[in-house]
Amino acid sequence: MSDPGSPAARHRIAIVGAGISGLAAAHRLRVLDPAAEIVVLEQRSRIGGVLHTVDLAGRPFDVGAEAFLARRPEVPALLAELGLAGEIVHPTGARPTIRAGGRTVGMPAGTFLGVPTTGAQLSEVLSPSALAEVAAEPSRSFRWAPGADVALGAILRERFGDEVAQRLVEPLLGGVYAGRVDALGLRATVPALAAALDDGATSLTAAATRAATPPPASRGVAPRESGGAGAGDSGSRAVESGGPRVSGQPTGPVFGALRGGYSTLLAALLGAAKADLRLDTTVRALERRDQGWRLVLGPTTAPEALDVDAVVLAVPAPAARRLLEGSAAATALAGIELASSVVVGLAYEEVAGPDTSGVLVAADEPLAIKAATHSSVKWAHVSPDGLLRLRVSMGRFGEAAALQVDDDELVARARRDLATLHGITAAPVAVHVQRWGGGLPQYAPGHLDRIAALEAAVAELPGLEVVGAALHGVGVPACIATAHAAAGRLTNPASRHFR
């Protein structure tokens, strides 16, 4: 790229989507190319995407993602760059629980994301027959083709029976993807387990044991991360898989959050990006030109053309696919489906509540919710006023129809289940219902190949980048990483862009 101070170097870049990926891309582009004209186009009337902070009884409260993996560098480094390092907070020492077999018990020890290791302690969660299946698994014949990818649920059920899948693994990963284990691919969602199988583990138990106990040379290296953006329920404490590895010796707590909620980060990114933000703006079409791209905006009755040198698509996979229709990139994106979910925030006066960080709910429990985070207990900064604040999560992949009721019914379901789980029958003093229609991408079997095909196809389209949760992890750090990588490619003088 030529001298950014010269007229020829003033590039116009459109970013479609004002979620964390889009805003992180806008900010990094501003840092790398101060002269650029950056336009951020957002269909909604607010920024943030699936990050959203609301007022719940007078306090900021996140109703999208609530936490990030602090042992990845992206969020702490970005906060430090923005002068917000002092806003990072970490969970208390409260422990999570799980509801299984009609009982609420402590999260069992000795599993890797719910997959039993040789030291698993599962007697409080599994039935005697399921315990017997777990005990017998290491001695059963096992065949694995290195490099293979399968539905996580299929291999769990074949090796351990149904209860491990329904009572352990699905509750944990459901807090990340709002997904079903039967639809999630092993290689993208639990990559360390797949790697152990590729390396010759003789059973699934052996693979989980190896994944949970890295060799001495790699101890202290932060695991791959896939969780958090859009879910953030009480399962986050146990989730550390998917996304690029982080080098170095991590120290301090595993997870972090922001004292004032994610809105603090979003506002800082937007301000530092100095971008032209256009809310309530629909991008209807994307057209390749001889030089750059043309975006067609607004209603069909009054379309507006926006010509730019480059485009960053920071939107969900189906939206990106529509804009790239007819290309190889669209074909790759077509295989990525979305799950819908709901978060209900509730605040109570004079209610003590449980002393745990939250509860995950097994998939075979007769309850409407999949998790409840005891936010006032899990995060010391949430309730300095003494109120009890909780967030309840509902909805898994394929359950969108069950969520198509009014807000009052969703709140009623949440309250019924809180009464069952914790004996909380008091009326809340404040409630917020947040619907996430198509909020989380599903990493189905073959996801890594799909993304490799997407990135290869995008590489053939100069001036185009695709970023976000559909690629290399649904967590906030992974989204930021894709945004920063895209900005780096766009501003690299030796890159394929702007030619």
Image (cartoon, rainbow, N blue to C red):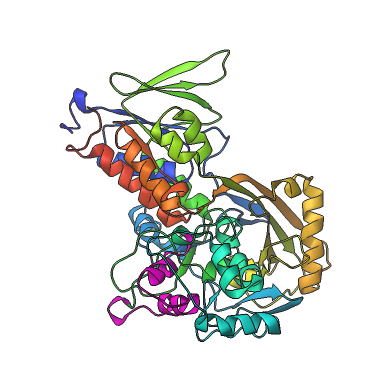
- Asked whether residue 172 is in view, the answer is yes
Q: Residue at x 32, y 41 (%)?
A: 456
Residue at the top extreme?
A: 301
The image quadrant where one finds the C terminus is: top left
Q: Against 293, is 69 above or below?
A: below
Please indicate whether residue 471 sits to the left or right of residue 462 in the image.
Answer: right
The image quadrant where one finds the N terminus is: top left
Q: Which residues are magenta?
A: 189-218
- Asked whether residue 269 is in view, the answer is no
Residue 100 is situated, as x and y percent measured from the top left of the image, at: 71, 74
Please indicate whether residue 445 sits to the left or right of residue 220 in the image.
Answer: right
**Residue nearest the viewer, comparing 176 with 10:** 176
Q: Against 164, is 438 above or below?
A: above
Q: Residue at x 75, y 64 (%)?
A: 348
Residue 105 is situated, as x and y percent measured from the top left of the image, at: 68, 80
Q: Against 340, is 117 above or below?
A: below
Q: Is 392 a magenta residue? A: no
Residue 250 is situated, as x and y percent measured from the top left of the image, at: 34, 72
Q: Is 197 a magenta residue? A: yes
Q: Residue at x 33, y 47 (%)?
A: 484
Residue 357 is situated, as x and y percent measured from the top left of the image, at: 62, 73
Determine which quarter of the picture holds residue 159. Answer: bottom right
**Residue nearest the viewer, comparing 458 with 32:** 458
Please indicate whether residue 109 sits to the left or right of residue 494 in the image.
Answer: right
Give the overall secondary structure of the magenta segment: helix
